[in-house]
């Protein structure tokens, strides 16, 4: 017998109401998009810096805006989608809100473990967090062995670190587009939401794959 598709099995098991469905657009109270002025202001400022040729400033503003978005996601979820969560997921949201020391990466891990966000948004947020870490954490410790066999450690820039004197227009454009993509994916409206160019721009994963291929050449 032919194997049933995942969707058929899903509806046989859960019916049309189904179990909890991960949240697609946590910034929006409905299924559409809204302009959230807080994140929009960061994106607008990043675009101003990009237009003026201030590339590292563009990267910094985009990174900080992303961090603000992630840190306020639990508040937006409580405001717009709390009644859609299971009791366990509601507990996770409460725990995140109570601990102001959590990093963006830790918040995303807790939301992922609780299956709160749609997989596409979760993936984009975590991928951008990896990129942002090249700005926030550009230094790494390397082990160095001397001829006599003794070991010491030195600090050096990570291979893909983004620092003021090395930031390029390509870097700035990438961070700005990534940030706008995440705002739009979250249900907000970035400066690029209605631009035709944003429709044809490669996805975050496609850009990362392209970068890896270029590094091999």
Image (cartoon, rainbow, N blue to C red):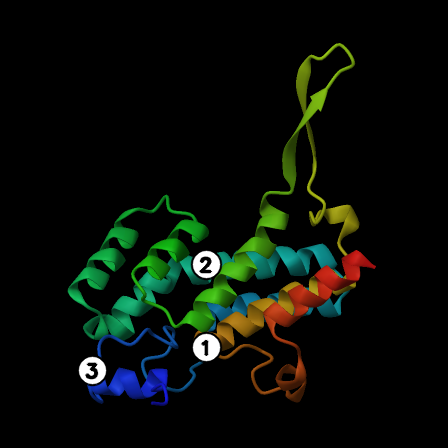
**Residue at screen point 34% across, 55% down:** 110
Contact between marks 1 and 2 (CB within 8 A): the answer is: no
For discs 3 and 2, the disc positioned in front in the rendered view: 3
Expressed as whole percent of the image width and height from the top left, the position of residue 28 reads: 37, 79
Where residue 135 appears, as percent x and y from the top left, is 63, 49
Q: Which residue is mark 2?
A: 68
Q: Is residue 48 left or right of residue 38?
A: right
Q: Secondary structure at mark 1?
A: loop
Quarter of the C terminus within the rendering: bottom right
Closer to us: 199 or 3 = 3
Disc 1 vs disc 3: which is toward the camera? 3
Residue, x 76% and y 64% (percent of image)?
A: 170
Look at the picture and state if 50 lies above or below 110: below
Circle 3 sits on which residue?
A: 14
Could you tell me how far apart the alpha carbons at marks 1 and 2 are, in whole angstroms? 14 Å
Q: Provide the secondary structure element on which disc 2 rests.
A: helix
Viewer-nearest residue: 214 or 76? 214
**What residue is pinned by disc 1?**
188
Count of numbered circles on the image: 3
- Between 214 and 202, which is closer to the camera in this rendering? 214
Marked residue nearer the N-terminal end (1 or 3): 3
Q: Residues within 10 Å of mark 1 (few under 14, many from 20)?
A: many
Question: In which quarter of the view is residue 173 placed?
Answer: bottom right
- Which residue shows up at 22% across the image and 89% down it? 16
Percent position (x, y) of residue 194? 58, 87
Q: Is residue 68 left or right of residue 111?
A: right
């Amino acid at each position: 017998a032919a194997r049933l598709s995942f969707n058929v099995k899903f509806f046989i098991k859960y019916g049309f109401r189904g179990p909890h469905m991960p949240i697609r657009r946590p910034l929006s109270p409905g299924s559409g998009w809204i302009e959230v002025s807080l994140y929009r202001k960061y994106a607008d400022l990043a675009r101003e810096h990009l237009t003026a040729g201030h590339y590292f400033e563009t990267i910094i503003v985009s990174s900080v805006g992303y961090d603000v978005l992630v840190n306020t996601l639990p508040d937006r979820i409580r405001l717009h989608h709390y009644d859609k969560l299971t009791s366990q997921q509601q507990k996770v949201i409460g725990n995140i809100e109570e601990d102001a020391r959590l990093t963006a990466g830790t918040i995303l891990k807790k939301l992922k473990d609780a299956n709160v966000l749609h997989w596409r948004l979760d993936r984009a947020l975590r991928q951008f967090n990896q990129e942002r870490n090249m700005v926030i954490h550009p230094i790494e410790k390397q082990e160095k062995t001397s001829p006599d066999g003794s070991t010491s450690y030195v600090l050096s820039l990570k291979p893909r670190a983004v620092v003021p004197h090395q930031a390029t227009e390509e870097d700035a454009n990438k961070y700005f587009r990534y940030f706008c993509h995440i705002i739009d994916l979250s249900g907000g409206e970035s400066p690029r939401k209605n631009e035709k160019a944003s429709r044809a721009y490669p996805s975050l994963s496609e850009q990362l794959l392209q970068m890896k291929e270029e590094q091999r050449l």
